[in-house]
Image (cartoon, grey):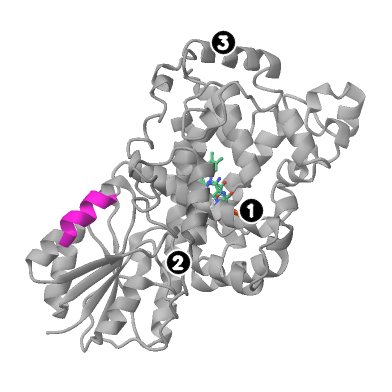
Amino acid sequence: MAGTIVWFRNDLRLADNPALDWALTRGEPIIPVYLYVSSEEGDWPLGGASKWWLHHSLLSLTNALGKLGSNLIVRRVDDSLASLSELVMQSGATAVCWNRRYEPSIISRDAKIKEELISQGIDAQSFNGTLLCEPWKGTKADGSPYQVFTPYWKNQVAKGFGTQPLPAPSRISSPKNWPDSVSIHKLELLPKNRWDKGFEIWSPGESGASTRLITLLSSIVETYEDTRNYPAQAGTSMLSSHLHFGEISSNTIVHAIRERFSNAKLPTSIEIYIKELVWREFAYHLLFHFPSTPKRPLNSKFSRFPWVRNSAHLTAWQKGMTGYPIIDAGMRELWATGWMHNRVRMIVASFLVKHLLIRWQEGAAWFWDTLVDADLASNTMGWQWSAGCGADAAPYFRIFNPMLQGEKFDPKGEYVKRWCPELKNLSVKFIHSPWESDASELEAAGIELGSSYPRPIVNHEESRKRALEAYRTISSGVA
Ligand code: FAD
């Protein structure tokens, strides 16, 4: 009887993987396992775009393990504990290990699994393979959680973060007999109706993540401070889905940045990039300490907010047919590629909750289904921030003007023209407000408002006033 089961979850990589490293030090045959257990994800089973990513990421991990003479046992099950116990029986393993996840339903599930395996005499161990600082460690001195980012960040800097990443193994010893496994295709993660054509920009898996890291180090990180706000430019790392699925660790990224700029005081641009990684940590901190926030506003006064139900407006927003070009470009980029630039995420989210007065939870649910980087912690924080009801949130009364945001962050209209090609012949002057253009210009640009491109579904000034009035109904003591 010997062997160690390495239970892969959101850590689909071989390098800097503490659970795998621990298994290797035990010196027994290793049984790498992935369990697809949709029923245990609580209210958040994987969305369509995440499933697509997972399919390809599992293929990549299988391939990487195969090169080391190993294998990935894949199963589609309803009960992780029962499945792990069965695998223990079938393989004769004496230990099971994994890297921790932090979603509320998973935390309680994993605690039960660990307890039960230990009671069966199995050495069950869990590790931090995801965060620079786990949520219970980054608290204030009195143990309470931070709700404002700047002191959280200062505390992280004072503690120091990042360790020497663990190397990927060069060999993994295999059991004599492999337990049964299903083909990754049997998990049915790919869409039946192929809406995923635009996803070819992605290379899920550890080597795809490494390629993005190389690009970050060679051409993005030094100019990040200037370029990160312009959605038409490739000015951000696009590492979010690789991070979500654990194909690379934040630790590896921070370490690589430090090595590249060795010992020199990190330039501002690089510090800003690391700060973004720490925003992600902050999101996990909030989710852990406020586990009801994926459903409910952190600021409870917002549960009385007079949200509006309007399915026509919600559909127009989802489809990128609001008549506001920067909103439509963002929503179409999301649909086509499974990703949207952060600046545009903020603009479209603000538009949904303020211009349309639609509940932030509707927007979060749409993002959950369509983002390849859908992440319960970051998505919840992003939406609560945008709605003004979360930690360190944008005040509700600060309402983004989509035309000004477009002019500022897409000054030549390149991003809008890429995703709303029907506007490609419109002059820069009107690219963010086609309805202000005169009839002859529209005709010359081949645009018929209401036909080839929608008229605005709401009036900006009226919506702004309506949002402020709605906010006033709950505002005493909120701001
Ligand atoms: P970069 O600019 O290169 O940043 C590097 C990394 O830092 C990112 O990969 C990400 O892991 C982290 N990061 C950057 N900004 C943030 C942020 N504001 N919050 C948390 N982490 C951040 N991010 C997700 O990963 N998953 C989500 O589901 C998600 N939903 C969001 C919803 C809304 C409404 C908003 C406003 C933001 C959301 N974000 C989410 C945060 C952010 O938009 C993405 O992380 C970022 O756009 C990913 O692109 P990138 O990898 O090029 O980021």
Position of residue 122 in the picture relative to residue 370 (left or right): left
| Image: 322 above or below 370 | above
Q: Amino acid at mark 3?
A: Glu
Using the image, determine if residue 22 lies above or below residue 390: below
Picture coordinates of residue 92, whole percent (x, y): 13, 80
Q: Quadrant of the N terminus?
A: bottom left
Reply above or below: 116 against 90.
above
Residue depicted at x 56% and y 26%: 395
* Residue range highlighted in magenta: 106-114
Q: In the rendered image, is residue 303 in sight?
A: yes
**Tag 1 secondary structure:** helix
Q: Quadrant of residue 467?
A: top right
Which is nearer the N-term, disc 1 or disc 2? 2
Residue 469 - label: 3
Q: Nearer the viewer, mark 1 or mark 3?
A: 1
- In this rendering, the answer to whether 40 lies above or below 26 is above
Distance of label 1 from label 3 (alpha carbons):
36 Å
Circle 2 residue: 57
Q: Residues within 10 Å of mark 3 (few under 14, many from 20)?
A: some
Q: Is mark 3 within 8 Å of ligand 1?
A: no
Looking at the image, is mark 1 or mark 2 nearer the viewer? 1
Which residue sits at x=74%, y=49%? 232
Q: Residues within 10 Å of mark 2 (few under 14, many from 20)?
A: many
Q: Which residue is mark 1?
A: 272
Q: Are marks 3 and 2 in contact (CB under 8 Å)?
A: no
Alpha carbons under labels 3 and 2: distance apart: 47 Å
Q: Where's residue 178, x and y in %?
A: 23, 82
